[in-house]
Amino acid sequence: MNVIEVQNLRKEFNSYTSRPGLAGAFRDLFTRNYKVHAAVDNISLTVKQGEMVGYIGENGAGKSTTIKMLTGILTPTSGSIMVNGMNPHKQREEFVRTIGVVFGQRSQLWWDIAVQESFRLLKKVYRVSDEDYNRHMGHVIETLEIGPLLDKPVRKLSLGQRMRCELAAALVHNPPLLFLDEPTIGLDVLVKLKIRKFLQEINEQYKTTILLTTHDLTDIEALCERVVLLDEGKIIYDGKLNQLQEHAVEGKQIEFEFLSEVPRSSLPRVENIQWEQKDATTWLGYINGDEQMVSRLISDVVQRNPIKNVRINEVSTEEIVRKIYEEGMALT
Amino acid sequence: MSMYLEMIRVRFLMMLAYRTNYYSGILIYSINIGAYYFLWSAIYGGKEEIQGLSVAQMTTYVAVAWMARAFYYNNIDREIAAEIKDGKVAIEMIRPYNYLGMKTMQALGEGVFRLLFFSVPGMIIVALIFPVRFDANFTTWIFFFISLIFSFIVNTYINLLTGIMTFFLFNNSGLIRAKRVVIDLFSGLLLPISFYPDWAQNLMSYLPFQAISYVPSMIFTEGFTGEEIYHALLSQAVWVVILLIPIRLLWSQAKKHLIVQGG
């Protein structure tokens, strides 16, 4: 079953450019230079129930705009959206009962009152029965360890404490679909781990579908099998994360740390290897080719030079994404 | 329905979170009433009455007008503007309720809070110091409260309209300030409408502002009697209906126009 179905979705914004100088400012009073800019440019996407999808892209790539259209906040310029079998913008009030949203950069709790008062209000807003609330939220509160925070006003919470409460607030009505827009922004490692573990748990327990945007790719690595990569409003990759790793970066990187300074000439000269000097005693070898090459190269180098340390570097997702943005997508 | 009641409760809690505002509010209102009392006693001098209002009626008019203001006055226009400006309106759009309805309920929560914990004790203080008459009969009180509810609705509608304008103007703090002055002036808070020149009275009868302050205060001071009361209440009710139209139109436009600023 498809939870999200998006076809040829497009969102344009009119932006105006200011003319320079005082004379320009006066001219702007009467006529302005408008420019149409497509934040989301004809994307199509389907997400199945129970999937955890990482939605990644640079700043301004159109991630948040997509989420805002999927949640019914923004009206698309063109294209069709079906989420949970509904049109988010047309059936807004009915639709939003079936989703949970966390915006990492804005709070949805009421600032001046205690956290539990916010929860109580949300419980009423989503018409959750006492029984459901106690069973479900009791579990959520326990897992996120926010019990002791409930009677404190939101403004007195630290960022990590607040984010956990935000997440709990988005789950008061136990929605089958959860949108998380940068939920781990600015959080320390421990809180991040706690949140990830919790997301995995609800995904397993309730088959909650999760769409996640983040700049921290370790979040994606830990949670998502599938990634959707966005660049300038277009989807440039949609598929398995490990496939992205295999395709986007060819070969492996081996780091040799020698005991003394080693010149380029004493390193083996093989066709498929590129050398790069990191510092005086460290060289990086990039191998293009099969796995066999790795062991052959290591034994070759080690025989000739006294070595301190050898490391085979797995290329991180971060590096892959960086490479894709800098060099363009290799696969289509 | 219960979520709207819950919202009123939350607003109560929020008002209680800022106690200093509350105490200073009582003081400021008492000072205002005192200042107007002395001003009007000076203007009246030895005169029995001006424009059909006696000194005692005038004092009561001023006190009632300010205390009623505590009930109908709210800042939801500024809140809506702020929520649009910093993008918080996005959060409101993912809630299964009507945003404007919820804002109205918040305003009501604020109004009821101020009426109970601010107007009533304030009135007691004022009545001890100044010669204010509260001997109005029972039906007058009833009419007064009906009128007060209408004035709350009219004022809140005008605030909603001003707030929604932010969707189109992006920064409308000027408009909000202008609206406040216009309401204080044209609603009869500072000066009863009957004191204005005829042409101005004529003009103001076509505007919704006197439904906010002039009508309830005149009903309470018994400046309006018999037929006049029904007429005034009817005009308030008419404005309640008429103002709904631009709100509906602007709101449906605003939702399409919504650009969540920042992020």
Image (spheres, rainbow, N blue to C red):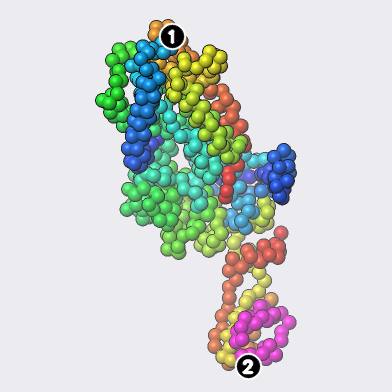
| Three-letter code, disc 2 | Arg
Residue located beneath label 1 in the image: B228
Please determine whether, in this image, residue A54 is positioned above or below residue A10: below
Q: Quadrant of the N terminus of chain B?
A: top left
Question: Of helix, strand and loop, which one carries label 2?
Answer: helix
Tell which subunit mark 1 falls on.
B
Instruction: Answer with the quarter of the image where residue A131 lies.
Output: top left
Please determine whether, in this image, residue B176 is positioned above or below residue B87: above
Q: Is residue B211 left or right of residue A241?
A: left
Q: Is residue A142 left or right of residue A262?
A: left
Tell me, yes or no, whether the two marked residues, 1 and 2, touch with CB atoms within 8 Å: no
Q: What residue appears at the point 34 percent right and 41 percent down from the top-left corner?
A: B20
Q: Which residues are magenta?
A: A261-287
**Number of residues whose C-alpha sits closer than 10 Å to that of mark 2, classed few (under 14), some (14–19) or many (20 or more):** few
Q: Residue furthest left?
A: B128
Residue located beneath label 2 in the image: A304
Question: Of helix, strand and loop, which one carries label 1?
Answer: helix
Q: What residue appears at the point 70 percent right and 65 percent down from the top-left corner?
A: A327
- Does the image show residue A305? yes
Q: Position of residue A234 (x, y in %)?
A: 68, 52
Q: What residue appears at the point 60 percent right and 60 percent down from the top-left corner?
A: A240
Q: Position of residue A123 (x, y in %)?
A: 39, 40
Tell which subunit mark 2 falls on.
A
Q: Is residue A278 magenta?
A: yes
**Gap in angstroms between the C-alphas marked 1 and 2:** 109 Å
Q: Position of residue B151 (x, y in %)?
A: 44, 22
Mark 1 or 2: in front is 1
Please determine whether, in this image, residue B200 is positioned above or below residue A66: above
The reply to whether label 1 and label 2 mark residues of one chain is: no
